[in-house]
């Protein structure tokens, strides 16, 4: 198990979503977390504030997080099609090949 306070977590891959509404653009970028550059992708084990079963895809999970103002990051579990939203930053992580944790990175638009 990994603890955020004990390791340097690197941000490697990202997914960017953009939603346009009348006069506004809301964007969110999500980065998958690894414990080092070549290390395995991490999965948060802290208690999520919202669990969505039967999520259609990673894109659906990330979109639902972007639309949830309390969601700062999420786990996506491939084999179970589960999306877990976190309202705070998790501290406990494990390596689980069927689960990836994504953290929301704020984007500033000018």
Image: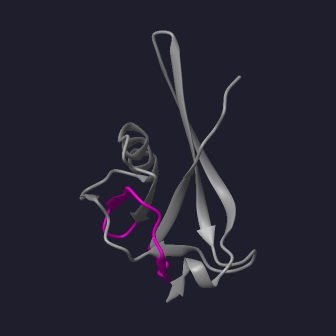
* Viewer-side residue, 17 vs 27: 27
Q: Quadrant of residue 12?
A: bottom right
* Viewer-side residue, 12 vs 104: 104
Q: In the image, what residue occupies the spot 50% across and 65% down?
A: 101
Instruction: Please identify the residue farthest to the bottom as the structure is shown.
Output: 1
**Quadrant of the frame with the C terminus:** top right
Q: In the image, what residue occupies the spot 36% across and 70% down?
A: 79
Q: In the image, what residue occupies the spot 31% across and 71% down?
A: 47
Does 27 sit above or below residue 64? above
Does 33 sit above or below residue 50? below
Q: In the rendered view, how is the structure colored?
A: one colour
The percent position of residue 3, horizontal first and vertical second, equals 53, 83
Q: Quadrant of residue 41?
A: bottom right
Instruction: Please identify the residue farthest to the front as the structure is shown.
Output: 5
Instruction: Please identify the residue farthest to the right as the structure is shown.
Output: 37
Q: Is residue 10 magenta?
A: no
The percent position of residue 87, horizontal first and vertical second, equals 38, 55
Does 72 sit above or below residue 11? above
Please state the extent of the stretch shown in magenta in the rendering.
Answer: 78-98
Residue 107 in the figure: left or right of residue 2: right
Q: Is residue 90 magenta?
A: yes
Residue 63 in the figure: left or right of residue 106: left
Q: In the image, what residue occupies the spot 32% across and 62% down?
A: 81
Q: How many marks?
A: 0
The percent position of residue 23, horizontal first and vertical second, equals 51, 10
Residue 55 in the figure: left or right of residue 100: left
């Amino acid at each position: 198990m990994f603890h955020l306070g004990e390791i340097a977590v690197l941000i490697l891959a990202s997914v960017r979503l953009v939603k346009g509404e009348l006069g506004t653009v809301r964007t969110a970028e999500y980065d998958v977390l690894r414990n080092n550059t070549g290390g395995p992708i991490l999965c948060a084990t802290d208690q999520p504030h919202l669990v969505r079963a039967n999520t259609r895809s990673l894109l659906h999970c990330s979109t639902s997080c972007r639309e949830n103002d309390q969601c700062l990051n999420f786990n996506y579990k491939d084999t179970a099609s589960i999306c877990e939203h976190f309202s705070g930053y998790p501290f406990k992580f494990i390596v689980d090949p069927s689960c990836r944790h994504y953290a929301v990175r704020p984007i500033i638009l000018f």
